[in-house]
Every structure is written in C-alpha cells, then in structure tokens.
Amino acid sequence: MPSSTTRANHALPASQRLAELHLDTETLLTQGSVVLPALLDTAECDAVAKLYPQTDRFRSRVVMARHGFGRGEYQYFSDPLPDLVQQLRSTLYPRLVDVANRWNEAMGIAVRYPPEHAQFLARCHAAGQTRPTPLLLQYAEGDYNCLHQDLYGEHVFPLQVAVLLSRPGEDFTGGEFVLTEQRPRMQSRPEVISLSQGDAVVFAVHHRPVQGSKGFYRVTMRHGVSTVRSGHRHTLGVIFHDAQ
C-alpha cells in the first residue's frame, strides 16, 4: 500500500513528483529490482492506457503469438513520445545511472554511462539505434508474456522500468510480474513482484552482479508476465536505450 505521504504527493504535478522521487538504491543494488509505489496516479494510468487504440502514436505493433513471445500484444511509441513517458525516461535515468555504473564496475565491464539521458541517447543514435523503445502492453484473458530480455542493439542500459496501469483484482486477475535469476551452475530462481495500479518496478535488463565468497559474479536476469485469468491488463514499459 502506498504511504499517506505518497498519496499526498499525488496532488503535485507529475514533473515535481518525479523530481522528488525516493529510490531505494541499496535494495536495487543488492536485489536487482525495487518497487516504486504509486509512481503514477489513477488519472495518469488511465490516460496512458487509453493511448493504445491511437495507432498514430506508435511506430509498430507486435502480436506476441506470431513470434512465440507469448499471448497478448504491445506497441512501441513513436517520436515524439507522450509528455509523461518522456518525463519518466529523462527523470528516472539520472536516478539509475549510478547503479548502472556500479554494476558494470563490479562485473568488470568497461562501459560507463553518462549522467544525462540525452547524452546516452546520442551514443545510441550514433551507433544506428534510433528507434524509441518505450512501449505499451495489452493483455486479455489467457494472455501471458514469456521470459525474455529487452535487448535492441550494442548499447544497452542495464535497468528498465515497468508501470502497472490497471487495477489488479478489479480490471484483471492473474497477470503477475515475474523475474527469474540464473546463477552459474544453479537452477533459476523465480520472484513474483506484487504491484498495485500506478506502482512501478525497476529491474535488471540482462545481467547483474552478485557478491560471492570470491568477489562478484554475473547472473542472468529475465522477466515476464504470468497468465491473465480474467479481464484486461495494461502496462507501460520504459526502456532507456533505443533500438536499431
């Protein structure tokens, strides 16, 4: 449940709320994911979900069953992004970049990320990754999303965000957000993350470091959505690298 302070903050403009957002960096560093309670309010969730039929706002539509990705569908936003989506992308990135750089250092990866999102996008675009990747996902009864990673080219920011736009238990049942972690020589560890409408989860795109007895080692992360049992579910995905 969002705290009373979080609910009170919904009276603030979205830009101010995002600027004052508290991120539990320690949990993200050690667990590979963290929930941001009530990142968006009800009106914002509904407004973003209602964009789905407006095909002129999107550059492409993917029907998951055609590609073996699961069931359901999603659409990638075209430029210019909706104002709120752009605010999320540009405001959340600076909060996450320190974790991203610390992860790469721990995993022995030489890549470091610049402090501002526009600088990172310039790097993507120079490498031919010019297509925006924020997306809107739509699920109906029986739909699900197979475990996957959102990799779209050479340049990958190691964290991304998913915002639940629908009301669990009212708009839909089932449809839980699932993360799996594959450690070397071990079976995969699943985690189901409970979200309310407007909650966001920040999570690892591809790999994250885990402290072992002999230092850090790299684990592989995947995410998906379990079967929707009834109703309809919408999710906003905020990915910080662009696609080829």
Image (spheres, rainbow, N blue to C red):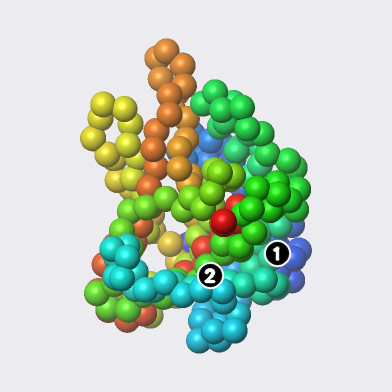
What amino acid is labelled 2 in the image? Answer: Tyr
| Residue nearest the observer in this picture, 93 or 171 | 93
**Is residue 136 among the parts visible in the rendering?**
yes
Instruction: In the rendered view, tell whether residue 56 sits above or below residue 208.
Output: below
Judge from the rendering whether residue 130 lies leftward or rightward of residue 173; answer left or right: right
N-terminal label among 1 and 2: 2
Name the secondary structure under disc 1: helix
In this figure, which residue is indicated by the disc labeled 1?
87
In this figure, which residue is indicated by the disc labeled 2?
76
Which marked residue is nearer to the observer: mark 1 or mark 2? 2
Query: Which residue does the image show at 50% across and 60% down from the upper left?
Result: 162
What amino acid is labelled 1 in the image? Answer: Gln
Which percent across, then down, holds residue 150?
A: 46, 53
Q: Would you say the residues marked 1 and 2 are in contact, meaning their CB atoms lie under 8 Å apart? A: no
Gap in Å between the C-alphas at discs 1 and 2? 17 Å
| Residue nearest the observer in this picture, 20 or 143 | 143
**Is residue 202 among the parts visible in the rendering?**
no
